[in-house]
Structures are given as structure tokens and as C-alpha cells.
Image: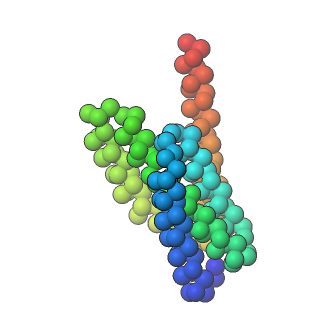
């Protein structure tokens, strides 16, 4: 986005608008929380982030900011819903404690790693690296869950 504060402000505003639109869509569509949908939304998140990283067109980047906001909602909301629906009530407190501990610790660690990476390889390559790593990790997780399910069925 360069050093243009207007473009950065528009990007931030469209991202926020996308989150509001995504929240409305999630509440109206009554989509059930399931792991495949969570995985798909996180992979879509990484794919849009990757496209933002390779794009030089500011209009496209701004439109992608809106889309990024919309698809970020399922990735933010559904994991918590999934825990509530699939973890026994007596264990939910412990699971949510771990969930929020990792989130709380991950935020400053992520900022530090991002800052270091941006200083080493630049913003564009940092975005590309982060989005690629995200997609690979989630794809690996999906593959391993499928592999684990196949092993359980064969036993």
C-alpha cells in the first residue's frame, strides 16, 4: 500500500466493513459450525492474504480488504462455537483457558515475528510467507485428520 495514509485508511475501513458484513451474513445464513467450514474459511483467509501480497493494484487490494473482512468472521467465530458444541461442558473451561492463553501469548509473539520478518525480507514477502505457511499448516491438518479417520475405520 506504500506510504499513502488515505489508501491505508480505506483498507482499514473496508476491512472493518467486511467484518460487519460477514457477521450479518453468518447470523442470517445460520451456517452450522463444523471443522471443514472452519478449515475452508482459514484457507480462504490465507489465499486472499496471498493475493493481497502479490497484487500491485490498489483498487484490487481495497476490494480484497472487504472480502478479507467477510471471510475472517467464520475463522474468528466458529472455532469457539465448535468447542462449545463438541467439548463436554465440564472440560470447556479448561479448553477455553488454553485457547485464550495461546491467543494472548500468540499476539505479541506474532507481532515480534512479523516485525522481524518485515525488517528482514520486506512487507510483501512477509505477507506471502505468512499466508503460504497458514495454508500449508491447515492443509496438513486436514490431511492428517483424514488419515487418522481412515486408520480408526480400519481398526
- Percent position of residue 54, x then y: 72, 67
Q: Which residue sits at x=62%, y=35%? A: 143
Pick the residue in front: 128 or 57: 57
**How many numbered circles does the render carry?**
0
Q: Which of the 4 quarters of the picture holds residue 51?
A: bottom right
User: Which quadrant of the rendered structure holds the C terminus?
Assistant: top right
- Percent position of residue 55, x then y: 72, 70
Residue 145 visible in the picture: yes
Q: Which residue sits at x=65%, y=60%? A: 48
Residue 115 visible in the picture: no
Q: Which residue sits at x=61%, y=27%? A: 147
Please determine whether, in this image, residue 130 is positioned above or below residue 89.
below
- Percent position of residue 56, x then y: 73, 75
Pick the residue in front: 152 or 82: 82
Q: Which of the 4 quarters of the picture holds residue 129?
A: bottom right
- Percent position of residue 64, x then y: 64, 67
User: Which quadrant of the rendered structure holds the N terminus?
Assistant: bottom right
Please determine whether, in this image, residue 103 is positioned above or below residue 1.
above
Single out the residue that lies furthest toward the front.
Answer: 28
Pick the residue in front: 26 or 103: 26
Image position of 118 (left or right of 61): left
Please determine whether, in this image, residue 119 is positioned above or below residue 129.
below
Q: Which residue sits at x=59%, y=68%? A: 66
Single out the residue that lies furthest toward the top.
Answer: 155
Indicate how the structure is coloured in the image. Answer: rainbow
Amino acid at each position: 500500500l506504500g506510504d499513502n495514509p488515505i489508501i491505508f485508511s480505506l483498507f482499514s475501513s473496508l476491512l472493518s466493513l467486511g467484518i460487519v458484513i460477514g457477521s450479518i451474513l453468518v447470523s442470517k445464513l445460520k451456517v452450522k459450525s463444523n471443522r471443514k467450514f472452519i478449515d475452508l474459511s482459514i484457507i480462504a483467509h490465507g489465499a486472499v492474504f496471498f493475493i493481497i501480497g502479490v497484487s500491485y493494484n490498489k483498487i484490487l487490494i481495497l476490494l480484497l480488504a472487504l472480502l478479507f473482512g467477510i471471510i475472517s468472521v467464520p475463522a474468528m467465530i466458529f472455532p469457539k462455537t465448535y468447542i462449545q458444541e463438541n467439548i463436554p461442558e465440564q472440560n470447556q473451561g479448561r479448553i477455553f483457558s488454553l485457547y485464550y492463553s495461546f491467543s494472548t501469548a500468540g499476539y505479541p509473539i506474532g507481532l515480534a515475528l512479523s516485525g522481524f520478518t518485515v525488517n528482514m525480507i520486506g512487507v510483501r514477502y512477509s505477507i506471502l510467507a505468512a499466508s503460504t505457511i497458514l495454508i500449508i499448516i491447515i492443509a496438513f491438518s486436514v490431511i492428517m485428520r483424514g488419515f487418522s479417520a481412515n486408520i480408526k475405520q480400519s481398526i
